[in-house]
Each structure stands twice: as C-alpha cells, then as structure tokens.
Amino acid sequence: MKPAERNREPTALKTAGSGDPLHVTGADDILTAVGEVLYDWSVGDDTIRWGANVLDILKVGALEEVSTGRSFGAYLDPSNLSSRHEAVLNSVAQDEGSGVPYQVQYAFLPHKRPEGVLWIEDIGRWYGGASGRPVRAHGVIRVINERYEREQRLAYLSRYDELTGYFNRSQLLLTLGDVITNARRLRAPAAFLIAAVDNFRAINTAYGYAIADQVFAGVARRIKGALRDGDAIGRYSGNKLGLVLMNCDESHMLVAAERFLTTVREGVIETDSGAVAATVSIGGVALPRHGNLVSDATAHVQEALELARERGIGRFVAYASSPERMAARRENAARSAELVTALNDRRIKLAFEPIIDVKTRRPAYHEALARLVRLDGTIVPAREFVPLSERLGLIRLLDYRSLELALGVLVSTPEAKLSINVSVATTGDSDWLARLAATLTANRSVGERLTIEITESSVIENIAETEHFIGFVHDLGCRVAIDDFGAGHTSFRNLQTLEIDTIKIDGAFAEDLPNNRENQVFVRALVDLASNLGAETVAEWVGDEATAEILAGYGVTYIQGTLAGTAVMQWPAEAAPSTVSNRS
C-alpha cells in the first residue's frame, strides 16, 4: 500500500491552509448548538486545528491555550482513565489505509467554567504514515455532561436505593453471598438480619406515602449509625432493611439486634409532618450455620422475622431449626401443588348447602362452597385449602373458579338462588368484578338470585374499598352478606354505612346457645340491630331444634347447619349429601 493512501483524510475536514481553523460550511452554529467541535491533530508537530466554535464549546480564554496536544492535555483531569493521547499514541492497532477509529470519554477542566468539569466524548480516527503508526488524527469532541450525569445516576441506582442511599436489594444480596462464601472458607461467623418497620401500612394511611418514606429513611439512618465499620445495610424490600454483620456469632447477633431495636425505639423520626415514633421487628440468621446459600439465608431470616412479629412489635427472633416447621412446610408445599393441579384440571367444584327459613323450614337459597375433588374421588372441604391458598396468593384463582361455576348454575337453572364467598383480595380485583358484570349485565335475573358473602375481617381491613365493592355489586342487582359476624370487631356504625343486606352470625354463638347466657344476649342484640338496619340474619352452625326455637324467638330470619341440611355436590340440592362437613 502506498504511503499516500495511508494519509487520506475525509473531505469534510480539508482546510484552506496550514493553521487555518477547520470549517464545515454553514455547520459551526449547528455544532455549537449540539455541543460539538471538530478538530485535526498533527501528531508530528503536536498542533491541533479546531473548528471556529472551539472557544464556545471548551470555555477557554484563547485558541492558543488548546492549540497543541500538550496544552490541551493540561486541562484534563489527572484522574482520567483515558484520553485521546492514550487512545491514539498507545494504540496497538496498525493503519491499513482506512484509518483506525477510537472513542474515549474524559473530564476537561476549563478555568472559565464556574460549574467545573466538562465531560467530553471524543470520537475520531487516526491515520498512520509509512510505518502504519499515527501521524494525524481528526474527529469531533462532544460535551456530554447531561448524558454523563444520567449514566452516573443509573450506575448509582444499579447498586444503591434511591430513598435511603444504602445498598439496594441486588447489591445487598451480592454482599450477602460474598460474606457467606468467606464465612465458609475462613470459618468466620457472620449474621444476616432483616429489620421491618412495624405498622408501616398504618403509617402510610395516617400520614401518606411521602411521610412514610421519610420514616423509613429515618429508621435506616438510625440503624446505620448503630452499625460497626465493615457491616453492610441495604433496602431488602418495601419496609424492610437487610443488615449483614461481619465477625458476628449468635450471641453477638442478639446483642446487636437489641441495640438496633433500642436505637429506633428510644427516639422519634423527624418528618415534614412532625415527629413520628417508630419501632422495628427483627429476624436474624447465623451464617454459615443456618445459611450456606443466599436462598437459605433469606428464607430462614424471613421465617425468623415472621415469628418475631407474631410475638408483638419491637421484638427479635433468631432462626433455629425446627423439625415441626420443616414438616409443616413440606405439607404446605404438597397441598399447594395439589391445589394448583386441581385448578388446572378443573377439579375445584361447588357443594351446595341449604339456608332455610327458620319458620317454614324451607330452603330460601343455597351457599355455594368450594370443594377440591382428589383423583381418587375424595372430597376436600374448603377449610383445608382456602387458608393456604390465601397465604400463597392463589385465593383469587379459587374465587374466579367459584364465580364461574356459580354463574353457570344460575344461568342454567332459573329457580336457583345462591350465595358465594369472596376473599378480601377479590373485593379489590377489577378483573373479577368485570367477569361478574359481563354476565349480570346480559342477564339481570341472575344478579337478583345471587348473594355475595364477604368476611368481617375483609370489612375491617379496608372500609373504603369494601364500600365501593358493595356499591358495585348492588348496582348489578346482587345482595351482599357479611359472613362470620361477631368474630371480628366491625363497629355497628360500619354496618349502617356499608348497607349490608344480610348478617350471618358467627357459628360459635349458636353452639350451646340454650345454655350460654352471654351468647344469648349478643345474638338477641345483633338481631335487633339488623332489624333496625333493614337487614336479614342467618344463624350459622345450628344443629338442634332447641337452638332453632330460641333463634326464631329472637327474630332470626334464616338458619344454616346440620339441622338445615348438609352440603351436597350436585344440583338440585335434593341429591344425595356428601360426607364432608357443612362448615365451609
């Protein structure tokens, strides 16, 4: 290849004469607007020719200050990891005739810029002489401060939580993994703790999310101040902090946890809405004894935290192996798999339990209860799988299936009247409500024959959401019953606000009613209240005539239980009863 070919330069950078500024006709103003300037660097004599807008871009006082590679380099931050000089003169590439591209990023420190550093992206191509080594380079430099700050921000957020400034979950777990590895290799004890802000939902509700964030950040700062050098803290999840304690055995973990509990409890968090008191509950796990892997450590520390919360607020529990818990966990896993398979195989069915008029003893309607039918034909009552499905987040799928089956019966059987149970999760589920509305809008008579039962606990959890749910189903023509009333703490004022159609009295009050004076007083008062509110009443778990006669005397509308009839797996309800209990 001829040397002349090696020294080719793009036409756009040709200049009128030596020392003249670089020009791309009509483009200088455009380049200035986008923060760019062209340059041509002659490596041999170290001279640089710049575009006419160089002073506007680099913020230097005179062209002479950057007219050579050396003078330009004097403005570079000494901590730069790269520069044009490095990219060109230290390149290991050889120019084969078309030049060698380079792209570097570095900090430029102009004296005339009070804001400080300019971050530069330098993109160009160098050309070699006869030896193939650099003799000339030209390209464009671009000011990228906004992009650099954005990239730095993203890099920061890849490791740190924006609210607290401490590790995010990913970085926290990476640190935990490194500590576990070192603990195994060096036989050095360590600990992993999770501290959860108590009653965080209540703080959100009382003060708003912005103030709750300030409370969480304040708790994090307090705990960080109680950590030793070398320990790590990060945000594990919404209201939880993860703490990695180095050189910490189980006895030291207890001391540290008590220190964290105290430092949070014995002060208030200052927020924009004033001082807020906070406490934390903490679970801890010793490493590597109870956590050889990150997955084991996180599972065990979560279990310890749950136990701490069960004991009350502001408590600490260290994980300890429990054969009973392991057996229960295996049983839950087996039941979970069975439930998912049953849902997929459509082996979730309905059983129909009569609710009868206490005076006429004729069925008024039937409660549709979920049943799981095993492959061998065994029928599993709801009480054995519904609580687990709630813990595992499967309850909505069960509610969808129950709704589908109940609507099918109501549409195909005009004389059928049913009630179905929905969980607290479903009362706020727009998809479930949309499915209900789609059927009832097309067939209003179905809605008139359907009662939706919600539990008292779901009412307590979110009054506003429950009120919206009841209004929605009322608009569709359905009735609403509150189930298991008396087991919780719903106020009588809430009953009036929510416009409940039917109150189902918790079955515990019907058991031994003829001999229990306190239950008699409660049931009588509740029936009187329901009557004043225009609501009907259903007494659950009624198993004998003596109880039924007392309830009738109080004015109870309906009864449900073994006296009324057991649940059956077929419709109509007169089919042979199943062997499962009628209590859900």
Image: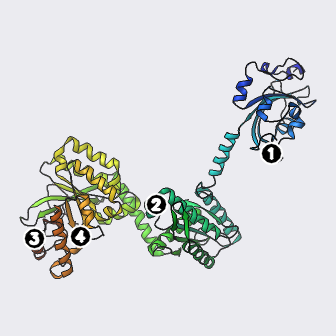
* C-alpha separation, residue under disc 3 versus residue under disc 2: 48 Å
Q: Quadrant of the N terminus?
A: top right
Q: Is residue 181 left or right of residue 4?
A: left
Sequence-wise first label, 3 or 2: 2
Tag shown at residue 506 = 4
- Residue that label 1 marks: 80
Sequence-wise first label, 4 or 2: 2
In the rendered image, residue 559, in percent from the top left (x then y), is placed at 14, 67
Q: Compared to 248, does 221 lie above or below?
A: above
In this rendering, which labeled residue sits more in front, label 1 or label 2? Answer: 2
Residue at 76 percent across and 43 percent down: it is 114
Sequence-wise first label, 3 or 4: 4
Q: Amino acid at mark 1?
A: Asn
Q: Amino acid at mark 2?
A: Tyr
**Label 2 Cα crowd, 10 Å radius (few <14 / some 14-19 / many 20+):** some
Element class at badge 2: helix
Residue at 62 percent across and 51 percent down: it is 157
Element class at badge 1: loop
Tag shown at residue 552 = 3
Q: Quadrant of the C terminus?
A: bottom left
Q: Amino acid at mark 4?
A: Asp
Q: Is residue 44 left or right of residue 413?
A: right
| Front-most of residues 139 and 193 | 139
* C-alpha separation, residue under disc 3 versus residue under disc 1: 89 Å
* C-alpha separation, residue under disc 3 versus residue under disc 4: 16 Å
| Front-most of residues 571 and 260 | 260
Q: Compared to 129, does 218 lie above or below?
A: below
Residue found at the very far left of the displayed protein:
360
Residue 561 visible within the image: no
Q: Amino acid at mark 3?
A: Ala
